[in-house]
Amino acid sequence: MVQASVSTSSNPSNADFSGGVAPLAGSNEQLREWLDNLAQRIIAGERIGREEALELTQIEGQDNILLLCEAADRVRQACCGNTVDLCSIINIKSGNCSENCGYCSQSAHHPGKNSPVYGLKSTEEILAQAKAAEAAGARRFCLISQGRGIKYNSPKSAEFEEILDTVRQIIAETNIKPCCALGEVTPEQAQALSEAGVTRYNHNLETSENFFGDIVTTHTWRDRVETVKNVKAAGIQACTGGIMGMGESWEDRVDLAVALRELEVESVPLNLLDARPGTPLAGRPKLDPYEALKIIAIFRLILPEQIIRYAGGREAVMGELQALGLKAGINAMLVGNYLTTMGQPADQDRAMLEALGLQGGEAPIPAPQQSAKLEI
């Protein structure tokens, strides 16, 4: 369970929302009015607590979920604007991973069918894909490697030094911003990444601390939190989110969102499980698209200023309803392919944004919570 202590302050950004219980048994119009009031309070700087967020999870039915999405979209527009943060990723080293994450087909414990296995890609190959991602409209390009993390390599790891050199080369030859996701890092390694030019680091918590052990046993949720703290201490933005649809409860989803708020992460990828053959989660049914929309909306209401990113699984889970996510609180997208699954063409994503009156670019990052004392 997340432990948080928030100091008393006149700053409205640290106030707890106390707008009463949602009228779940009332009319559609009563719920709309309550959600309007909730959105206005959040926009004004109040923040909902865990119990208020759990009330939102009780909203059921497509019409009512769409009302929830409308409220979340108003918060997104007011707090983040209409720019959708676009990034792309590359799997720079794949397969034979020592960790047993139940969703991942790269694990040596349960290698997925046809999951690729290869060593570190060359700087030239990574640079070529960075240039292609930039041409497709991405503003950031994330280098992702399998494994528990470079923290467990020797202090002068040749692979780590090669990755740092690749980051510098991307900065020298493109206008795209390189990010990294290399697993757990020490404070010293985080500082080296910062000095090389990495400004954002992806390290997902995946789910709540309570549910984490049901998905991974080779490392802990606290191990992940430590790395998030290390990169933030080095001045690197944290891109930290999770995967929805692994069998977690609504309480787990809310606890994850609250933990992300208390860690003050800047970017929150929301992956929607597209279960991979051969993994322990292979039999999990796909989320219902309206349940996914409810998740997105609730994350936006808990995290009004954060960059909330459509990540893996959006095509498979949302299908023709993808655009609704961008009207439910999403203000960022991965474009192109994912680690072990294919994405839709970038021009299709651009057309979707244009149809919604949105524009690709770089979304604003949330301001630091100056007066909050947070302990996780």
Image (tube, rainbow, N blue to C red):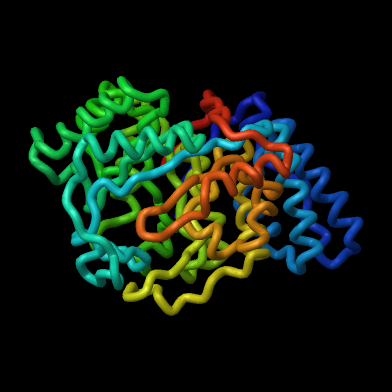
Residue 213 visible somewhere in the drawing: no
Which of the 4 image quarters holds residue 308?
top right
91 left or right, relative to 139: left
Residue 227 spot, x, y in % from top left:
30, 41
Of the 4 image quadrants, the one containing the C terminus is top left
Which of the 4 image quarters holds residue 200?
top left
Of the 4 image quadrants, the one containing the N terminus is bottom left
Residue 236 spot, x, y in % from top left:
37, 29
Q: Residue at x 91, y 56 (%)?
A: 29
| Of the pair 26 and 235, the residue shown nearer to us | 235
Residue 263 spot, x, y in % from top left:
45, 39
| Of the pair 186 and 24, the residue shown nearer to us | 186
Q: Residue furthest bottom?
A: 283
Q: Residue at x 47, y 64 (%)?
A: 273
Q: Residue at x 57, y 28 (%)?
A: 364
263 left or right, relative to 20: left
Q: Is residue 58 above or below residue 169?
A: below
| Of the pair 356 and 279, the residue shown nearer to us | 356
Q: Residue at x 76, y 47 (%)?
A: 71
